Amino acid sequence: MGILLEAKDLKVGYRVEGKILWAVDGVSFQVEEGDIVGLVGESGCGKSTLGISFLRLLPPGSRIEGSLIFNGRDLVKLSEEELRKIRGKEIAMIFQDPMTSLNPVMKIKDHFIETIRTHIDVSEEKALEMSANVLEAVGIPSSRLESYAFELSGGQRQRVMIALALVLNPKLLIADEPTTSLDVIVQAQILDLIASVREKFGVTIILITHDLGVVAQMANRIMVMYAGEIVEIAPTDKLFSSPLHPYTKALLGAVPTIDLNDLELHSLDGSPPNLLNPPRGCRFYPRCFEAMDICKSRNPHVVRISRDRYVKCWKYR
Amino acid sequence: MEFRALHSLFRKIVKGHGGIALLIGGLILLVFIVFFIFAPFIAPYDPIKPVGPSFSPPTTKFIMGTDNFGRDVFSRVIWGTRIALTVAIFATLLAAFIGIPLGLFSGYRGGLFDRVLTMIMDSIYSFPGLILAIAIAAMLGPGIINISVSIATIYVPTYFRVVRNQVNSIKAELYVEAARALGATDGVILRKYIFRGVVPTILVILSMNIADAILTEAGLSFLGLGIPPPTPDWGFDLSNGQRFLLQNSWWMVFYPGLMIVLITLGFSLLGEGLQERFNPKLKER
């Protein structure tokens, strides 16, 4: 399997009060073809910013630096027009809230026709045929093409969004909290669907979530983000069985389990640092229970532990 | 103003989703459209020539009486529909064609352009409408085109503000970002996502504005800044007739006034009905 996406020292910043806030501050990683990569972290850690930067859907006035090589092209350097051709065609995205991701005054079929004909030159009939096929594949009857968004339930809308994202057979699908606003049963169905479309459509998926249960079930690799940095990358089973970074350990400790020997829920004191004025040393240092002297003054480098494990912590120097 | 009182009375009678308002408004307007198209066949006399004695009260021969020149008031009132509707619709459309694109562009782009344009529009908007129209009409001189342009000027900010504010709220919607994530161009987003969301509101304002434009046109003509005589015009006939009110020639004022009230009522009802139909928030009441 080749490498589909490779970030090198990627930085994404917003202009705040005349300064630049680096919401994503120098991350490097690789995504292999066929992966389902889980990107986890708490609110405000920069995971959504990283998510939209794969499509460079950044608000005006924001900055992006470093490189983001997708299929041999650097997304950071592409023009707006070149990016537009990639969006939806090669990289697609589904969002957190399916209730508002569809245009209320357009029929479902118009969303499809619009998206298809933006990218490829086909007749309306052909576009409709493609739409019907992909809709059926996500479990929505093609008769729904004539519906408006308000006639569908939340789960159905998310299925439609997934179909819309997949209709042009993109290589990469970014799913930003795709199940957060759905109830638990529908959540499970949508996750199953996402897992099944990976096989059916051969798409690589980056799943952004704060729900460790979701990534445990779905992802084969997990990237843990904290305060704009990726602190640990590991295969899912290894991350859960032997977490390396103290933050990962704390995250796992804060998840309720049904293990009777471990009834206590560990919470993590304190809050993430202000990114407008990041601390000089390790960003996790003030909350870390394994902190050492060096952590206070110098930010650790990323250390490669094994072929597919990386951690950003002084303990593993 | 009479039509406002009538208007709120109707609001109390008409509940539901604006069905009755649409019906009554539509019927009234239908009658006026018939007047507009078939004026030469409906009007019994030439509206600009003396056809009988001066100051004749309503009789079977002159059902709405005659004016000081012996012209038939009924014929003038029917023909007056043409001027009123032409000016009002032309002015409103002109205002919409300028205001809507400006609002779309300004709201979508934002930035300095948006701030400057908003400031200009707000200053026009804060100026009393009729006075601004008088100033512009006085500058341009009388005539159908000129009076339409001066009326249009007052309404441009209405469209601009409404469209711009809607664009601002729609452009922050997730579905617009989702469309962009699927590769939609700016043109498509503006046309299919933003403009379409604004259309219901625009329809309502159009209808309401035509009603207002008829009043403004009548006002300008009343003040002698409208259509030059002897063209039949309700506003002009009102000002002509009010000079003879003291000698009890009430019909010269009553019938043109009645027409103005009825046609504004028609458009207001239509606008109200459209609003109830298209605005889901109002349906909750």
Image (cartoon, coloured by chain):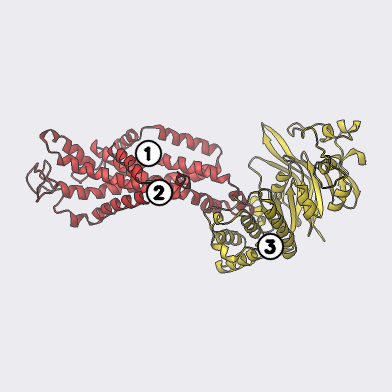
Chain colours: A yellow, B red
Q: Secondary structure at mark 3?
A: loop
Q: Position of residue A129 (x, y in %)?
A: 60, 68
Residue at horizontal 87%, vertical 38%? A300
Q: Could you tell me the amino acid type at mark 2?
A: Gly
Foreground residue among A196 and B247: A196
Q: Could you tell me the amino acid type at mark 1?
A: Ile
- The residue carrying mark 2 is B16
What count of labels does the image hold?
3
- The residue carrying mark 1 is B154
Q: Residues within 10 Å of mark 1 (few under 14, many from 20)?
A: many
Q: Is residue B203 visible?
A: no
Quadrant of the drawing holding the N terminus of chain B: top left
- Chain letter, disc 2 residue: B
Residue at horizontal 11%, vertical 40%? B68
What is the distance, in whole Å, between disc 3 and disc 1 at their CAs? Answer: 52 Å
Badge 3 vs badge 2, beta-carbon distance below 8 Å? no
Quadrant of the drawing holding the C terminus of chain B: top left
Q: Could you tell me the amino acid type at mark 3?
A: Asn
- Chain letter, disc 1 residue: B
Left or right of B232? Residue A161 is right
Of circles 3 and 2, the one toward us is 2
- The residue carrying mark 3 is A169
